[in-house]
Image (cartoon, helix red, strand yellow):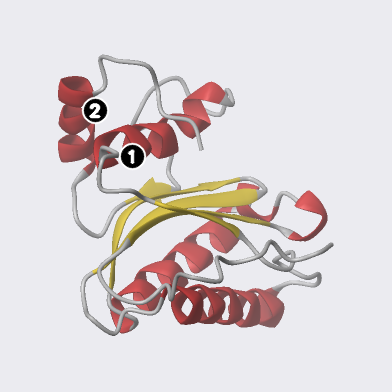
Amino acid sequence: MVRPRRLDDFDYVGPNAYFVTACTFNRVRWFADDGCARGASAQLLRTSSDYGFDLVAYCFMPDHLHALVAGVRADADFRKFTAMFKQRSAFDHAAKRKGRLWQEGYLEHIVRSDEKLEHIIAYIVANPVRAGLCDGLGKYPYLGSSCYTLEQIQEMIQMNTAREPWRP
């Protein structure tokens, strides 16, 4: 697989927000395993803190991750953060299981100032409901935020998503 290109005229450093999707290698359903999903989640939370990012919302689907991250420091480097998260989680995975965790690369959407974060959060946390993995927000164990409680996310979504749903 060819890695998706990054924007040449954007440095990916500083207080920017990104919607990111990373897929497992060969779309293996690694995150259907509780230990694997929780281990990767712990690495995501650790790495976001280490690299100066708020983890606004995330969801580990069986074969991919969706996350909305926002730089909170001037030196918050999205490319370094993403590379380190994938490295840390892959190392943790390899220590416990056989098989490669991540496919090469990832897709990112740089969130523009006119986009409402609440709509992106709603898209992320409703993903398991749309996929039939659970029957309601908050009933899926592999999603969360470093900024908000699940109750706050649900309230935010109810108050701010009356219009057309966001799509990446």
Q: Amino acid at mark 2?
A: Ile
Query: Relative to 35, is 52 on the left or the right?
Result: left
* Residue shown at the point (69%, 61%) measured from the top left: 4
Q: Which mark is residue 24?
A: none
Q: Is residue 86 above or below residue 149?
A: below
* Residue shown at the point (17%, 32%) measured from the top left: 156
* Residue shown at the point (19%, 46%) measured from the top left: 149
Secondary structure beneath disc 1? helix
Query: In the figure, residue 46 lies in which quadrant?
Result: bottom left
Query: In the figure, residue 87 lies in which quadrant?
Result: bottom right
Task: From the top left corner, tell me how far across and down residue 57 is, in percent.
Answer: 34, 50
Q: Which residue is mark 2?
A: 157
Residue toward you, 66 or 9: 9
Which of the image's four quarters has the N terminus?
bottom right
Q: Which residue is mark 1?
A: 121
Q: Alpha carbon of mark 1 to alpha carbon of mark 2: how far? A: 8 Å
Task: From the top left corner, tell me how far across and down residue 61 is, in percent.
Answer: 57, 44
Instruction: Check the image and name the residue furthest to the front.
Output: 9
Q: Decide: marks 1, 2 in contact (CB < 8 A)?
A: yes
Neighbour tally class for label 1: few under 14, some 14-19, many 20 plus, Cα within 10 Å: many
